[in-house]
Each structure stands twice: as C-alpha cells, then as structure tokens.
Amino acid sequence: MLQATQSQQATAFVCPSLPENAFATDVLAGLGHTPKTLPSAWLYDQRGSELFEEITGLDEYYQTRTETALLGECAAAIADVVGPNAVVVEFGSGSSRKTPLLLDALVTPRAYVPVDIADDFLDDAVATLARRCPGIPMLPVRADFTRPFRLPPQLHDTQGRRLGFFPGSTIGNFAPGQAAAFLAHVGKMLGAHRRMVVGVDACKDPAVLLPAYDDARGVTAQFDLNVLVRINRELDGDLPLDAFRHEARFNAKASRIEMHLVAQRAFSATVLGHRFDFSAGESIHTENSYKYGQTEFRALANSAGWDIERVWLDTRSRFAVYLLRPANGE
C-alpha cells in the first residue's frame, strides 16, 4: 500500500531516459542540420520553466485560463468515470497548477506521479502540491517524457486504475506521428485499467493564435532566447544573443504555430569547439504547436489505440479537454 511518507514527497525518481550528454548531442546535431533546429524539450531548464509559467498568465495566452475553466467544469464527470483509488500520472507537469482540480474530484487517489525534465522546478511544484493535497503520496519522476521512461519502482507491483494527465495542449508540440507514438507508449505504461485526460488547442484564426506565441511584453521571446543562454552556459557556446530575434509563424498547411530564432545578420559561432555559420535571415526552429479539430484528434487517438469517451469544449470552441479510454472498450 502506498503511503504519503516524507521520503516519497521529497525525492524524485531519476529515470535514465536521457542518454548521457543528450543536450550536447541534440544541440550539435540540430545546429548542424539544414534547416537548423532544436528539440523544444531543451527550452525547459529552470529559467525556461519559470518564463513559461509567466507566459501562461498573459492576456494573449488564452489556453491556460480556458483549459482551467473547462477542467473545473468536467473534473467531477472525469472522476465518476475513473473511479476510486486511481494513480494519476502527469506528463510534463510543470507547476502542477491544474492538478488539484483533478485530485480534489477523484475519490481517494492512490498517488500522484508528476514527470518533468526540470528537476528544481519539479521539486518546488511537488512541495507546493504536497501542502495543498496532504495525504496523497507524491512520487515525482525526473525524466524527459518525450523519450521512453519508467514509472517509479513503488508502482511496479501495483495494479488498478491509472489516469494519465496531459494538459496544456502539450500534445501539439509533437508532430502527428510522434504524438501517436507517444499516446501508444503511454497506453502501455498506464496498463489495462487506464484513462487519459488530454488538453488540445483547436485550429483558429491566426490573429488569435499568433499573439499567444509572440506577446506584447516579450515574455515568449525571452523564453525562446533562453535556450541560447543555456547553450552558452552549459556547452561553452558564444552565440551572440543580440543577433537573434524571436518570431512566431503560422503554418496553415501543417495546422501549426512555429517558433523560430531568426539571425539578424551573418555571423559564425562555436559550441563545444564546433563552428556554425549563420546567414542573415536564417532561423533555428525551436518549437511547433499543432492544432487539432475534433475529427483530426479522434483519428490521432484511434491510431494510437484510444477512443474518445467524452469531450468538453469552451463556448468559443477554442480549446477541448478529451477523456480517452482504451480502444478495446475497457
């Protein structure tokens, strides 16, 4: 039986999902690629996570407040379907700000398992949530959830209900094929008696979408540029920060927002002794955010072994919260 012990609440299970020197490997490969690119997971060091939390409170960033309101409306219905004694696993948990809406609605949740790559940020979020939800075992996992990882050893011998939680439209950061692979992997991880809650941003007018990724205060620009700060700090880089500007683009054909760091001038820079040349106007593609209508997301879920059990939309159909069940009907 899982207990909410102090050791469980204070120590993260460090899952070896990240190969040694993964950051360096990804950066060198991405900057050497044509076009240049970086995996979006590396945006989320401690400072990046803090900046993203600031983004979620901006007027332009409608996603967080819309999803939070929807979760407040549907949490009880989700709890009715899931049943008592469920383990909640949140992928890319961040501040876990929305999590209490689910934990409060569920009947005697057995444990909460937040998975995040930013270890200091993860520790702070778990400490805050443990005070907010005393009595629920907290089993944090430090891992890159975009790569294969394991659940904490405390759960290896437990069976029963498991609820995956993937809010924030983070599913949109995967290309569709990667999103399907992720959902399929999560399904196997959660087991037979599983459900999953996924927040999904709908496709809409670029006049609404673009400001959410390029706000007037420039917080998103700081968030994007911070990955260069990290490269310079951790990988002995000399990328000139003042030579780049943040740019958000809407790719209508792919139904996605793209974030780019665009070189303002031609220059050369080094990272770990490797030289990289930039031409004026060349960009580093740092993140995608795919947008899905209900038909498209249903097809994606079905391809990964899930069916849609319920869906909740806001009044403007900007955002959806989906409750998924196994395609075999369990």
Image (tube, grey):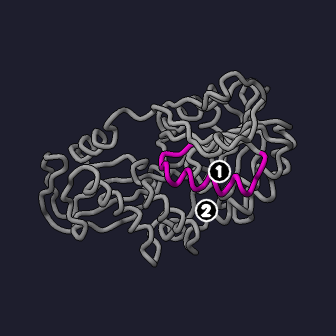
The answer to which of 266 and 166 lies nearer the viewer is: 166
Q: Is residue 119 above or below residue 258?
A: above
Residue displayed at 65% across by 32% down:
302
In the image, taking residue 119 as reference, residue 129 lies left or right, namely right
Label 1: which secondary element: strand
Residue under numbered circle 1:
199
Q: Which residues are magenta?
A: 115-135
Q: Whole-percent x and y of residue 113? A: 65, 40
Mark 2, residues whose alpha carbon is within 10 Å: few (<14), some, or many (≥20)? many
Residue under numbered circle 2:
63
Q: Which quadrant of the figure has residue 281?
A: bottom left
Residue displayed at 17% across by 64% down:
280
Q: Is residue 133 magenta?
A: yes
Q: Is residue 209 magenta?
A: no
Q: Whole-percent x and y of residue 217? A: 45, 78
Amino acid type, residue under disc 1 in the picture: Gly
Amino acid type, residue under disc 2 in the picture: Gln
Taken as a whole, is the magenta stretch helix, strand or loop? helix
**Extreme-top residue of the structure:** 157
The answer to which of 28 and 279 lies nearer the viewer is: 28
Q: Is residue 38 above or below residue 163?
A: below
In the image, taking residue 23 as reference, residue 293 lies left or right, namely right
Q: Which quadrant of the figure has residue 89?
A: top right
Q: CA distance from mark 1 to mark 2?
A: 9 Å
Asked whether the beta carbons under mark 1 and mark 2 sit within 8 Å of each other, the answer is yes
- Quarter placement of the N terminus: top right
Residue displayed at 79% across by 41% down:
109
